[in-house]
Each structure stands twice: as structure tokens, then as C-alpha cells.
Image (cartoon, rainbow, N blue to C red):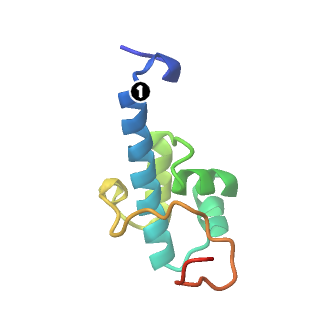
Amino acid sequence: MPTRPRQSSEEQTLRWAARRESVGARIREIRLAQDLSQEALALESGLSRNMIIGIEWGRKSVAYERLWDIAAVLDVPISSLLAAPGSKPVTTPYRGGSRSMEPRP
């Protein structure tokens, strides 16, 4: 039984990354549906905004106790955070301005 990330197989590491992305995308989806900012979610859940950003983009792991804090702020059952997101996670951050649906040259 591996105890450190470097002791895990590549397959397990990829599975964990996919799970982080899925949970993060679901948190972001619920937060946006409620018109809640990352800053507001961070303040109310006791996490930093950078941590919320990292969780939403699947780059940071979160202790399961913190999932309850996030679910409480979003006023959803914890199981809804573990459900598959309604849409595929976005892989590039949105930096503001208007998004063009046309590909860049």
C-alpha cells in the first residue's frame, strides 16, 4: 500500500488527477450557478482563494473535512460535489474580457 505519491503507480496517479478535476469542476459549476465568487466561497469555507482556485482546476487535493465546509457554503449535500460535472471541465483558465468562439489564427 503506497503512502506517498511517488510510491504510487502512474495509473493510480492519473486516476487521482481525474478525480481531482471532476470534483473541482463540480464545485466550480455549483459555485457559478449560485453566482458566488471564489473569494466569497473561500471566506465562508475558511480556505484561501488560491486553494479554491487550485481545487477547481484539479491542481490541489483537499482534505475530505474541507469538502463538508465547501458543501455547507454551497448549501448542497456532499454527494453532489462527488457527482460528475454537467459539462466537461475547462482546461484553460478564463482571464477576463470577452471570449471569442472563433479559433485564433
Image point (41%, 53%), residue name: 23
Residue furthest front as drawn: 105
Disc 1, SS: helix
**Quadrant of residue 33 in the image?**
bottom left
Quadrant occupied by the C terminus = bottom right
Point 44% across, 41% down: residue:
17
Residue in view at x 68 percent, y 71 percent? 95
Kind of residue indicated by mark 1: Glu
**In screen coordinates, is 100 left or right of 79?**
right
28 or 63, which is in the foreground?
Answer: 28
Q: Badge 1: few (under 14), some or many (20 or more) residues near its Cα, within 10 Å?
A: few
Against 59, is 97 above or below?
Answer: below
Q: Is residue 43 left or right of residue 24?
A: right
**Residue 43 image point, x, y percent:** 66, 61
Residue designated by label 1:
10
All told, the count of numbered labels is: 1
Give how far across and how far down residue 46 sits, in percent: 63, 53
Q: Is residue 48 visible?
A: no
Residue placed most toward the observer, 74 or 82? 82
Q: Quadrant of the N terminus?
A: top left
- Which residue sits at x=56%, y=44%? 60
Q: Nearer the viewer, residue 57 or 63?
A: 57
